[in-house]
Image (cartoon, helix red, strand yellow):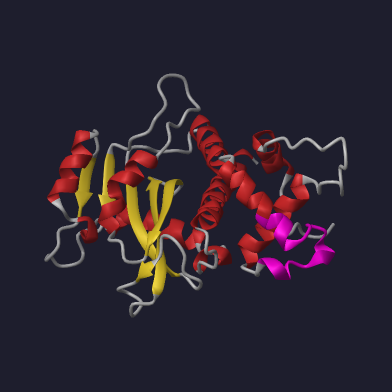
Amino acid sequence: MGQRRPWEVEDGLWERIAPLLPVVERRQRYPGRKRLHDRRVLNGILFVLYTGIPWEFLPQELGYGSGSTCWRRLRDWQEAGVWQALHELLLAELRAVGLLDFSRAAVDGSHLRAMKGGAKTGASPVDRGRTGSKHHVIVEAHGIPLAASLTGGNRHDVTQLMSLVHAVPPVRGKRGRPRRRPKVLYADRGYDYDVYRRELREVGIRPVIARRGTEHGSGLGVHRWVVEAAFALLHWFRRLRTRWEIREDLHEAFLALGCAIICWRRLKTAVD
């Protein structure tokens, strides 16, 4: 048997996604062309995510439908909250098998070029003022993404700190109250503002943030490297290296889907 291509949805992942997809009833009168199966369209969406190919160039011989069909399903499923629900489901399963560690977390941001502009873009100070966006991610102790967000490239990382913390969903998977807050949060000196340290303490999180004006080599890198590793995994998906979507909700859909796939890979490795 040939090797499975990475954008082809595995049975285990499909079993988790299928119940989350909205049911679309076919019209009785003038039904038109039969709707392409959701799993095949999802393969097309993942093909675009992995390869970064423009929607209109999606190869028809793959049998995943047209680029416009995949685009519309991605939009509709994002509006239905499918990708966020999938991410939360996989986080719960990871916690159930003991693979989530809330003893500490790390947060950071990463710039990407926005080729067509759109909402949540801005002149990036790290890219000669070119139009860009930023990914902001918070991960647990092993680098599993708990939440991610998109902003303009001109937004300072620290302005998204508390919104990221509050975006972490209640993670179930074990008896008792769901977990939502890490005990300790590590961040680089870009987050060195006492007002945000106070806000973190108010929600029960101990901040460990490098101080500006001090020499590098604080030792915090042994805890913060996991968020850099998470960005490397996310940006391995070519559609997340550069923003091509004018609509921010579609890029956010790819971002949430990328986080969910990272969770699925960790879970599959543990249970296999």
**Left or right of residue 35: residue 83:** left
Task: Kindly indicate the quadrant of the structure image that contains residue 267.
Answer: top right
* Magenta stretch holds residue 74: no
Q: Quadrant of the C terminus?
A: top right
Q: In this rendered view, identify the residue nearer to me: 93 or 21.
A: 21
How many numbered discs, if any?
0
Give the image location of residue 141, x and y in percent.
38, 45
* Magenta stretch holds residue 62: yes
Give the image location of residue 212, x and y in percent.
14, 62
Task: Kindly indicate the quadrant of the structure image that contains residue 157.
Answer: bottom left
User: Residue at image x 72%, y 54%?
Assistant: 43
Q: Quadrant of the N terminus?
A: bottom right
Q: In this rendered view, identify the residue nearer to me: 25 or 222.
A: 25
Q: Is residue 7 visible?
A: no
**Considering only vertical position in the picture, is 70 above or below 24?**
below
Residue at the outermost top position? 176
Residue at the outermost bottom position? 128
**Left or right of residue 264: residue 44:** right
Magenta segment main secondary structure: helix
**Left or right of residue 31: residue 118:** left
**Left or right of residue 112: residue 86:** right
Task: Kindly indicate the quadrant of the structure image that contains residue 151.
Answer: bottom left
Give the image location of residue 11, x and y in percent.
74, 42
**Considering only vertical position in the picture, is 177 above or below 32?**
above
The stretch in magenta equals 55-71
User: Residue at image x 31%, y 52%?
Assistant: 160
Q: In this rendered view, identify the residue nearer to me: 122 or 256.
A: 122
Q: Is residue 186 visible?
A: yes
User: Residue at image x 14%, y 47%?
Assistant: 195
Give the image location of residue 87, x and y in percent.
53, 41
